[in-house]
């Protein structure tokens, strides 16, 4: 159990550093196409064990989002989107629960649940995160097309990078 906690703490800081150092410094704004942002830090919340208590889940999401907000100079946007994703996570897990249920020490990894399950799980939660992020950032009904395009393009790029991470590093815990 302690091994799982230590690995998740290391993953938390690793993804935080990657997000802040690598993806904060890269401007993906192409003239006439400003819809790309990269989000890899939600993976720290996605890969927490299934039985993670809600207070730990939402507290970790708030802490991670607040730190990212501090470096991106975006007051509360990352924290709000990540807390929303963390709030929805137990409901998505309940919806995607296998017929026999999750085991006592179940994890949300590709290793334990299969690649197809992880693709769906990560796509749903990352989609919720990205959509809520752009709704909070833009916050206007007049910009619905911008919210949609930003969400779609950022989701695709972020999801591809998360899947690359999952297949290259292959976290088992």
Image (cartoon, rainbow, N blue to C red):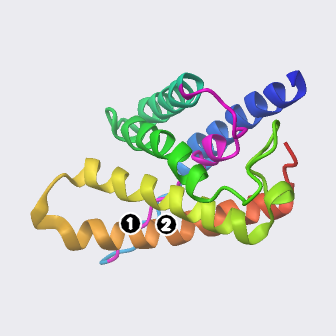
State if disc 2 and disc 1 touch (CB < 8 Å). yes
Along the viewing direction, whichever of 12 and 28 lies nearer the viewer:
12
Q: Residue at x 35, y 67 (%)?
A: 150
> Residue 114's quadrant in the figure?
bottom right
Question: Where 152 sits versus 137, above or below?
Answer: below
Q: Is residue 41 magenta?
A: yes
Q: Position of residue 9 (x, y in %)?
A: 74, 28
Q: Looking at the picture, how far across and down is residue 123, in whole percent?
A: 56, 65
**Disc 2 marks which residue?**
155
Quadrant of the rendering where the N terminus is positioned: top right
102 horizontally vs 170: left or right: left
Dot 2 lies on which element? helix
Give the quadrant of residue 119. bottom right
Looking at the picture, tell me which residue is in the foreground, 84 or 148.
84
Q: Is any part of residue 54 visible from this angle?
A: yes
Q: Which residues are magenta?
A: 33-54
- Mark 1–mark 2 Cα distance, whole angstroms, equals 6 Å
Quadrant (top left, top right, bottom left, bottom right) of the C terminus? top right
Q: Is residue 21 magenta?
A: no
- Residue position marked by numbered label 1 in the rendering: 151
Marker disc for residue 98: none
Identity of the residue drawn at 66% across and 55% down:
97
Identify the residue at horizontal 47%, vertical 34% (top origin): 65
């Amino acid at each position: 159990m302690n091994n799982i906690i230590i690995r998740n703490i290391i993953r938390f800081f690793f993804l935080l550093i990657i997000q802040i150092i690598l993806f904060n410094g890269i401007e993906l704004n192409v003239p006439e196409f400003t819809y790309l942002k990269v989000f890899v830090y939600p993976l720290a919340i996605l890969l927490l064990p299934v039985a993670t208590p809600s207070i730990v889940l939402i507290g970790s999401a708030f802490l991670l989002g607040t730190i990212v907000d501090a470096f991106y100079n975006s007051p509360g946007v990352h924290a709000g989107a990540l807390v929303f994703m963390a709030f929805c996570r137990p409901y998505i897990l309940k919806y995607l629960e296998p017929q026999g249920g999750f085991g006592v020490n179940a994890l949300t990894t590709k290793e334990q649940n299969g690649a197809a399950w992880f693709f769906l799980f990560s796509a749903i939660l990352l989609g919720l995160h990205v959509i809520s992020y752009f709704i909070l950032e833009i916050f206007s009904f007049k910009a619905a097309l911008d919210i949609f395009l930003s969400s779609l393009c950022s989701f695709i790029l972020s999801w591809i990078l998360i899947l690359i991470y999952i297949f290259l590093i292959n976290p088992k815990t």
